[in-house]
Amino acid sequence: MDKLQIIGGRLLAGEVRVSGAKNAALPIMCASLLTDQPLALDNVPSLMDVRTMSKLLAQMGVEVGDQEGGRVQLQAANIANPVAGYELVKTMRASVLVLGPLLARCGRAKVSLPGGCAIGARPVDQHVRGLQAMGAEITVEQGYMHATAKRLRGARIAMDLVTVTGTENLMLAACLAEGTTLLENAAREPEVVDLAHCLRAMGAKIEGDGSQAIRIQGVNALSGARHRVMPDRIETGTYLAAVAAAGGKVRLSAAAPETVAATIQALREAGAKISCRADMIEIEMDGRPGSVSVTTAPYPGFPTDMQAQLMAMNCVARGKAEITETIFENRFMHALELQRLGADISIQGNTAVVQGVARLQGASVMATDLRASASLVVAGLVAQGETLIDRIYHLDRGYEALERKLAGLGAKIARVR
């Protein structure tokens, strides 16, 4: 099994290109189920999760072209098998996003309850309740959701909590529903907005994306389209946090600065000099960062997917920081691994108290989930000596060519067996 070997203590310098967003690409790929016409996508990242989604869609009958240079074409001319089986779904929670479009297009679906990272309960009850409000009949038997609907009907759906995948699933379903659907307490994340952009290009009638109320007027059919996937704001934030921790001067190209405002604000508080323009972000860090306390929150708040990376930076910061996690109840597993590197972290309920230390020491550590993997990489870049990160298949789910990109910035990092 592959591992990452990092020899820490080097400043980062140069330019790195941000890849397309995993969390935007996956729901947009599911949008191909809503039409029998080709959906051509650009800036699709080459990731394990994208390959898993391609396999899942192909098993249903979608023609999935080879991914070359970030481009892929999908065509669901005939959905012969509207089933998402456990073997693929267990590895990627985003697989549940096929439920809404399958119901809307085929009137039936059988979807395994989802898996993904072990970072706490992420129930699909909001998806189910919303689809039931639109007229679907859904039962759960032997770990599968069995759903049927003659034709979905528009409905007013007030979600009990903000859920990104729930918002996306219901938005996908509503595009072909009869009448108008109003999603209240909807997620405002940029990935939701990117999905809406793609659906509008396909002929959907959507208003209010990016706000807490999204209105979708159903249409009888959608057409094909071409869409460019937005830049990955979590990858962007991860590189920014790495520079803030390790020091140096780096330019990020093909970025979307407006989507990472909360992360930029936190790193500026830590002492980083950050400038933005159009699709470019430049960061310079001279010396040890200052500690920064944050509380995770739905967009536009500080993202839970950046919590682990900021914790890694705080491990070597001046002073004490408190990081409060409000989204997932089991997302501090990386703290134990950071302690193996010499970090001073104590967990008090849903808050991690991090007392910065002058230096970390390299050690063998194990990744527990996708963003935890990234935090160990950030810490390894700072630690003295060798850090060996095991179970990096988590990392491959969400970061395209991470070790190559960091090596291009001067890091001593390599994939080993």
Image: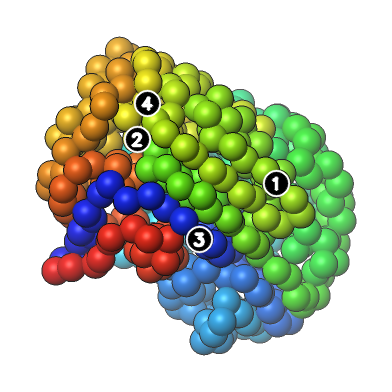
Q: Which residue is depicted at the point 23% across and 42% down?
A: 383
Asked where in the image residue 18 lies, by quadrant, the reply is bottom right
**Residue under numbered circle 1:** 276
Q: Amino acid at mark 3?
A: Gly
Lower sequence index among marks 3 and 2: 3
Q: Give the mark toward the camera: 2 or 4.
A: 4
Q: Secondary structure at mark 4?
A: loop
Q: Is residue 386 above or below residue 322?
A: below
Q: Position of residue 48 (x, y in %)?
A: 39, 67
Quick one: 275 or 371, which is closer to the camera?
275
**Inter-mark Cα distance, 3 to 4:** 23 Å
Q: Give the mark toward the camera: 3 or 4.
A: 3
Q: Which residue is depicted at the point 27% across and 36% down?
A: 334
Q: Position of residue 143 (x, y in %)?
A: 34, 50
**Residue under numbered circle 2:** 312
Lower sequence index among marks 2 and 4: 2
Left or right for 389, reference 76: left
**Residue under numbered circle 4:** 317
**Inter-mark Cα distance, 2 to 4:** 9 Å
**Residue under numbered circle 3:** 14
**Inter-mark Cα distance, 1 to 3:** 16 Å
**Inter-mark Cα distance, 3 to 2:** 22 Å
Lower sequence index among marks 3 and 4: 3
